[in-house]
Image (spheres, rainbow, N blue to C red):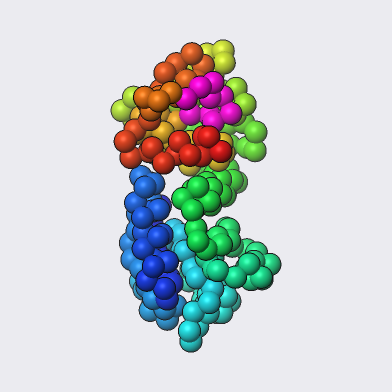
Amino acid sequence: MGIRCIVVDDEPLAIRVLEKHIMKVPDLELVATFDNAIDAGHFLQDTPIDLLFLDIQMPVVTGIDFIKNTSIQPKVILTTAYREYALEGYELDIIDYLLKPISFLRFYKSINKFRALNATTASTNIKSPEIEITSDHIFVNSNKKMIRIAFSDMLFIDSIKDYVRIHTTNETIITKDKISSFVEKLPSTFLRVHRSYIVNSKKIAALTAKDIVLVGGMEIPIGASYKEIIKLIKD
């Protein structure tokens, strides 16, 4: 399932920058943009959203005031040109604080923070017996057994229809899950580099000029819509 998001900023250029960044991340869905917090608030009353990119300095209602006075709201990533507002934003339990101009690399790291938070929340509310998650490992249901896999042992994951194969340093484990939902259960060090592949960025041995990463002796292609992620791997 994709991450539904909206952008609220009174600067058209700032909105366009975020629109371009969002388009580069396959599981992000931009539902709407607004140039003021009042219209955004009305929209949120009727439309479920996962993530809100919110400018702080806006006329009439600031981003900070919006967070303080709106009961219905998604998780928030604040955007601003003013570093001094960061502390107040974090006190309001936001996901992250992006300082303009916002690079794609910094933007993508914020998205991974959001994913990590969702994975942590899911681990405390697990209802399905298929997958259980903690801070350093995951339990998956494979062949009617719950198998513990340390994140540090995972090399990469690929998909086979409704299943994922988890390739570790010692074995390959298959569990029933969609790759799009499985990636959200992993720490931010795991990057989806192709519609069929997730890699542990800490296990990458090499990058090639042909859009391929080498992990555990396996050559894994970088999908056309995931090429911006190469910047994160090099970082």
The quadrant of the picture occupied by the C terminus is: top right
Give percent across and percent down for residue 58: 49, 79
Write the residue at 50% across / 61% down. 101
Q: Is residue 230 above or below residue 204?
A: below
> As rendered, which of 100 and 60 lies closer to the eye?
100
Is residue 99 in sight in this rendering?
yes
Give percent across and percent down for residue 53: 47, 64
> As rendered, which of 197 and 135 lies closer to the eye?
197
Give percent across and percent down for residue 154: 55, 24
Is residue 142 in sight in this rendering?
no
Give percent across and percent down for residue 231: 48, 39
Is 5 placed left or right of 100 in the picture? left
Write the residue at 51% across / 39% down. 232
Give the residues in magenta: 199-207
Q: Is residue 105 above or below residue 19?
A: above
Q: In this view, does 42 lie above or below 52?
A: below
Q: In this view, does 98 lie above or below 36?
A: above
Whether residue 12 is in magenta: the answer is no
